[in-house]
Image (cartoon, helix red, strand yellow):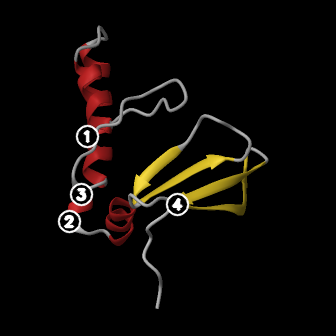
């Protein structure tokens, strides 16, 4: 029988990223924290429930989460890209073509 997660547990993984080990912490508040060994910043976290729901494909994981692009993570949602394309100053032919490409990508992900 497993014990309850009531205090933080930190382990060093054998997986390397940027030539540094990844430190994994399971916290008492039921989150998983990861950061590169020797770095003070760059910690990422996710709740255990959210991770489980995402991996299992359960309904609660299908809520839309808006992620704002940053310098370190320049990702943008396809719907946001489509909206920016619609108000761009390009000519109609190219805007319409690019909109079709984005719409097909969005439809293929459903």
Question: Mark 4 packing: few (<14 Cα in 10 Å), some, or many (20+)?
Answer: few
- Which residue position holds label 3? 62
Q: Secondary structure at mark 3?
A: helix
Query: Would you name the residue on which mark 1 appears?
Result: 103
**Which residue is labeled 2 in the image?**
59
Report the front residue among 49 and 105. 49
Give the secondary structure at mark 1: helix
> On the rendered structure, is 106 left or right of 22?
left
Marking on residue 8: 4
Give how far apart the Cα atoms at labels 1 and 2 are.
24 Å
Mark 2: few, some, or many residues within 10 Å (few <14, many ≥20)?
Answer: few
Which comes before the other along the chain, label 4 or label 3? 4
Query: Going by the image, does 20 lie left or right of 56?
Result: right
Q: Residue at x 52, y 23 (%)?
A: 71
In which quadrant of the rendered view does residue 100 lie? top left
Earlier sequence position, callout 2 versus callout 4: 4
Image coords of residue 9 (percent x, y) = 57, 63
Q: Are marks 2 and 3 in contact (CB under 8 Å)?
A: yes
Q: How many marks?
A: 4
Q: Earlier in the sequence, mark 1 or mark 2?
A: 2
Q: Which residue is at 58% across, 37% downward?
A: 42
Real-space CA distance between mark 3 and mark 1, rounded to the nearest whole angstrom: 19 Å
Q: Quadrant of residue 93?
A: top left
Cα gap from disc 4 to disc 3, whole angstroms: 29 Å
Which residue lies most toward the right here? 19
Q: Secondary structure at mark 4?
A: loop
């Amino acid at each position: 029988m497993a014990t309850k997660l009531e205090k933080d547990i930190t382990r060093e993984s054998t997986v390397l990223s940027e030539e540094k080990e990844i430190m994994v912490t399971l916290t008492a508040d039921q989150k998983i924290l990861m950061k590169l060994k020797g770095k003070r910043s760059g910690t990422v976290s996710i709740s255990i429930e959210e991770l489980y729901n995402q991996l299992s494909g359960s309904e609660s994981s299908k809520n839309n989460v808006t992620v704002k692009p940053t310098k370190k993570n320049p990702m943008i949602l396809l719907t946001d890209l489509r909206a920016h394309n619609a108000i761009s100053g390009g000519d109609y032919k190219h805007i319409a073509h690019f909109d079709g490409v984005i719409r097909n990508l969005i439809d293929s992900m459903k």
